[in-house]
Image (cartoon, grey):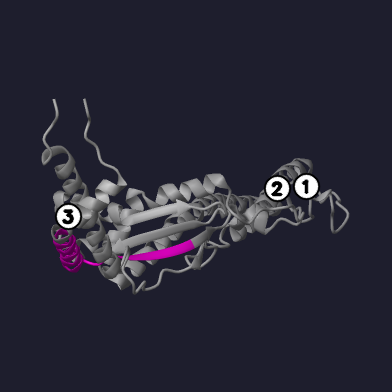
Amino acid sequence: MATPGFNLPDVVDTIRKHMRLILVISFLSAIAAAIFYKASPRKYEGKTEFLIRNPLFGDRSNLYNSDQKIFDYFADEDDVNRILLLVESDTVRKQVIRNMKLDYIYKLDGATRKGQLATERKYNKSLSVIRTEYKDVVLSFVDTDPQRAADVANEIVRVVDEVYGGYYKTTRKLMYEAIKDKTREEDSSIAALTDTLALLRDKYGIYDIISPARNNIMLSGLKHNGNKDFARGVEEIQNIESMKDQLVYDRAKNKTLENQYTTGTKIDQMHVVTVVTPAKNPLDPKGIGGILTVLVGGFLGLFFSTMLMSLYDHYLSKPRNN
């Protein structure tokens, strides 16, 4: 039994046979592609590229380290992963949507949960972030307005830097507040001990420096002043003085720590993100241009019409041999 089939010569013969119909279908496909291109909104991609610093470079142990140990100023894999997670996080998304008023631009009601979800879905669909082999991050945002696409991409990077860097700055501020509270306690204790010492010295008539913490340094020889409780007074003053001297020493160290922990806590200091290429107005829309769209539409029309005519000629128009 002969099985009908077709090969390249058959296809060429089909094209010659149905040339006018195939050309008409191809032409209509090209027109349909042109109409689709004109009717569909142009989308523009704002793209920015940035590097990530090691967030520990602003830590006091590195800022005030005199040993000059080797320190990598670029972020490691864990920090890069955290940045990628933060870019797509709800914290950054809500802040960017609020700052750029995207719910209003997208004509959605941001006051309702339904409108918020619709805005977030459109935002997520427009956002793309990838990490390259050089540990830098490429972030892009797609929008129908070219300038807005660039502005949103830059705003996302700014918010990520603010949130991620703010985490470390907030941690250092919490440490600073804890040390500051401890210093206040020490100030109160030192003031109380000072008052106690003044009373004891007046009570026993002892005005020499007596302190084991100062290695018994005295300004004059300690002589009995005739007070019957002189020995007891020396011991009491010595005990209180040693406690006060230790507190003064601890407070001095904590004051130094206070000053160190306030370093780099301002908003414009110790940025974690360094933008290598800021997003700019892309001017040209994303995807293939109008001419290529028309050519692709015409080619698809030519291809499918040829296949259909070939199938028709070889399987439907010819009688089957039993």
Residue 120 picture location, percent across and down: 25, 52
Q: Amino acid at mark 1?
A: Ala
Quick check: is 79 in the magenta stretch? no
- CA gap between label 1 and label 2 equals 7 Å
Q: Amino acid at mark 2?
A: Gln
Q: Secondary structure at mark 3?
A: helix
Quadrant of the image occupied by residue 150: bottom left
Q: Amino acid at mark 3?
A: Lys
> Are the residues at dot 1 and dot 3 in contact (C-beta closer than 8 Å)?
no
- By secondary structure, the bulk of the magenta-drawn segment is best described as helix
> Are the residues at dot 1 and dot 2 in contact (C-beta closer than 8 Å)?
yes
- In the depicted view, which residue is nearer to us: 107 or 68? 107
**Residues in magenta, as a range:** 23-49
Residue position marked by numbered label 2 in the rendering = 246
Q: Residues within 10 Å of mark 2 (few under 14, many from 20)?
A: some
- CA gap between label 1 and label 3 equals 112 Å
Q: Secondary structure at mark 1?
A: helix
For the point 66% across and 59% down, the residue is 63
Quadrant of the image occupied by residue 315: top left
In the displayed structure image, the side of residue 246 where residue 313 appears, left or right: left
Q: Nearer the viewer, mark 1 or mark 3?
A: 3
Residue position marked by numbered label 3 in the rendering = 17
Residue 161 picture location, percent across and down: 46, 59
Q: How many marks?
A: 3
Which is more N-terminal, label 3 or label 1? 3
Residue position marked by numbered label 1 in the rendering = 213
In the displayed structure image, the side of residue 227 where residue 64 appears, left or right: left
- CA gap between label 3 and label 2 equals 107 Å
Quick check: is 35 in the magenta stretch? yes
Residue 3 picture location, percent across and down: 22, 30
Which is more N-terminal, label 2 or label 3? 3
For the point 34% across and 55% down, the residue is 127
